[in-house]
Amino acid sequence: MENILIEEKREVYIEPAVDFNAQTGRCIIKGESFLEETSKFYSPLLQWLTDYLKQAEKIEFILQLKYFNTSTSKWILNMLGVLKRFEERGGKVKVVWYFFKDDADMRDDIKDYIYGSNLKIDMVPFE
């Protein structure tokens, strides 16, 4: 299985950096996500995640998003749903979400994802 490595793009719209590593089981989405065609960007990531979890025993999913738009939020919840189903089948899932410690809105968003996905998400504030 091939890895996915995407550098952050900051043009009219902003794409986050992505590093999905099939060898380590570590998947990172980082930066900002403000996309026009959100499904075009996230659909391959969701498919990769689904395919990867068919043969994996564990995964570490790391989010470090400073900002994301509403259409991105749906895709994040979809990915968390895939992780939850994997966990329910006995897979080991670790989700970590880094956020600026003064960003109360992001803290609330993460709590909403914990509630909506029923996954444990480690919230890690940083300066």
Image (cartoon, rainbow, N blue to C red):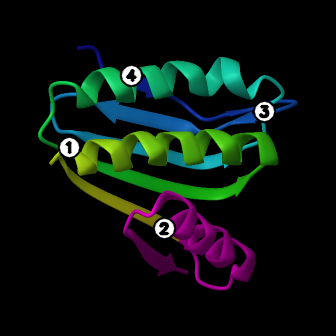
State which mark lies toward you, 1 or 3.
1
Mark 4 is surrounded, within 10 Å at the Cα level, by few (under 14), some (14 to 19) or many (20 or more) other residues, namely some
Q: Which residues are magenta?
A: 99-127
Splitting the image into 4 quarters, where does residue 52 fall?
Answer: top left
Taking depth in this image into account, of 71 and 86 the one nearest to the observer is 86
Separation of residues labelled 4 and 2 (CA atoms): 22 Å
Front residue of 32/123: it is: 123
Given the image, on which type of amino acid does mark 4 rest? Trp
Q: CA distance from mark 3 to mark 4?
A: 19 Å
* Badge 3 vs badge 4, beta-carbon distance below 8 Å: no
Whole-angstrom CA distance, mark 2 to mark 3, is 21 Å
Q: Residues within 10 Å of mark 3 (few under 14, many from 20)?
A: many
Provide the residue designation for mark 3.
Answer: 35
Judging by the rendered image, the residue that carries numbered circle 1 is 89
Element assignment for label 1: loop
- SS at mark 2 in the image: strand
Q: In front: mark 1 or mark 4?
A: 1
Task: Give how far across and how far down residue 50 sits, in percent.
Answer: 36, 26
Residue underneath mark 4:
48
Mark 2 vs 3, N-terminal side = 3
- In depth, the one of 70 and 82 nearer the eye is 82
- In the rendered structure, which amino acid carries the disc numbered 3? Leu
Of label 1 and label 3, which has the lower sequence position?
3
Queried whether the magenta region covers residue 113, the answer comes back as yes
First in residue order: circle 4 vs circle 2: 4
User: Which is in the foreground here, disc 2 or disc 1?
Assistant: 1
